[in-house]
Each structure stands twice: as structure tokens, then as C-alpha cells.
Image: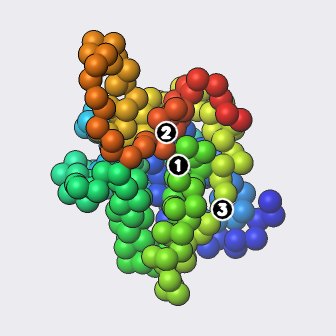
Amino acid sequence: MAANAGGKRILLHMCCGPCSISVVRALLEEGFSVTGFFYNPNIHPLREYLKRREGAAETAARLGVPVIFKDGEYDPAVYLRETAFREANRCFHCYRLRLERTLSVARRGGFDFFSSTLLYSKMQKHEVIRDLGRDMAGAGKTAFLYRDFRAGWKEGIETSKAWGIYRQQYCGCIYSEYERYRGELADLAPDRKTPPRGETPSREAPDGADAPADPS
Ligand code: SF4
């Protein structure tokens, strides 16, 4: 794509390293000045957060872009409060929480655009993220930049493997971790009834993880 963004500044919410690779590359190729933004209180547990943070930091360093890390705001209670009693629709609130924070920092920092690497994943609810971003931005000075970054899916997988970037095995929250591994519990308690709690978008092929088969 032609570099026509003319150095416009974009604050890019980063969920992890693997999802950021092809997104950052595409934005740089378009001519954007990219700053990453790592704010993900949904990730459980803390050690998983730290691994993904390291992956995002390494990816950004390799691609030469700065990152704002909101480590001081990592608090699982924030995510859990946002989703309590609405677990079946938790992904919407999880996206909203992270995009709202990105937009608030982007506005304060005078960025022209904000966006998210969540738009890279084939496992996330792509249209929900797109519509949320657009609705939030409204007609304000900091616009939501929508791109269908899923085109870079294969590149992200291959490059993250080549670079040795940490690749997670579940989407992020405690519910997604449970859904990823609950088969092990089922073996121990075959009669156990699973409570309905909505669906994890990455249950069958976790973002950045070695999915059963690369969907690309
Ligand atoms: S499954 Fe993923 S997107 Fe949905 S609430 Fe959990 S961490 Fe957020």
C-alpha cells in the first residue's frame, strides 16, 4: 500500500506480540507514525500478562516503535467488575474497556487516530470491535482507524515463530483459560454440567497460539 498517511500519529492498542507484527508493519508501510499502547487488564493470571507484555515489547523493539505500557493499571478486578453478571456478553465489555482507555490516552496525547491489534485476529468478533471503535470516536478529533488486518494473519504467525515471540494458548481472561482447558476436567468428571457463559472467540484457535491448523 502506498505511504499516504503522511506521518499522522496513531495510538495502537496492542493485545500481544504475535497480533502486533503484521499490523504495525502495515501501518508503517502506510506512512503512519505508530505508538503502541499496552493496556490489557483482562489477561489472567499476572504471569500470563507479563509474558504477553514481554512479547509485545520485543515485537515493538524489532519494528522500531515506542510503546506506552499501562502496567500500573493492571488489575484483574477492573476487568471482572466490567463483566460481572454479563459473562455471556463479556467480550463486548472487554473490547470496550480496552478501546475506551486507548481513546482517552490518544485524545490527551493529541493523536490523529487510534486502533487495535484485535482487528488482526480471525478469532475475535471483528465487526463488534470495528463498530465499537467508530461509535466511541464519533466526530471527535481522534478518529478510529479501521482496517481489516486479518489479511496479515499468516505473516503474524510465521514471523512470531521465527522471532521466538511468546504465543499464548488462550484468549486472555480467566473464562477463556477455563474454556481452553476444561476438557481435562471433563475427563475427571464426565457427568459434570458446564454452565453456559457465552463463548470465547479464540476457543478453537487461540490468538497467537498454535491452532489445531493454521486457518490461513
Ligand atoms: S474471551 Fe478474550 S475478548 Fe472475550 S472477554 Fe475473555 S479475554 Fe476478552
Across and down, in percent, residue 32 comes to 64, 65
Q: Is residue 131 left or right of residue 213?
A: left
Residue topped by disc 1: 124
Is 80 situated above or below 109?
A: above
Observer-side mark, 1 or 3, equals 1
Q: Amino acid at mark 2?
A: Ser
Is 130 situated above or below 184?
A: below
Q: Residue furthest right?
A: 2
Is 203 situated above or below 78?
A: above
Element carrying mark 2: loop
At x 66% / y 49%, what residue is drawn?
150
Please give the label number shown on residue 147.
3
Of residue 9 and residue 178, the one placed in the foreground of this image is 178
Spatial CA distance of label 1 from label 3 is: 14 Å
Element carrying mark 1: loop
Please give the label number shown on residue 102.
none
Element carrying mark 3: loop
At x 71% / y 35%, what residue is drawn?
216
Q: Which quarter of the picture shows residue 200?
A: top left
Q: Which quarter of the picture shows residue 169?
A: top left
Residue topped by disc 2: 202
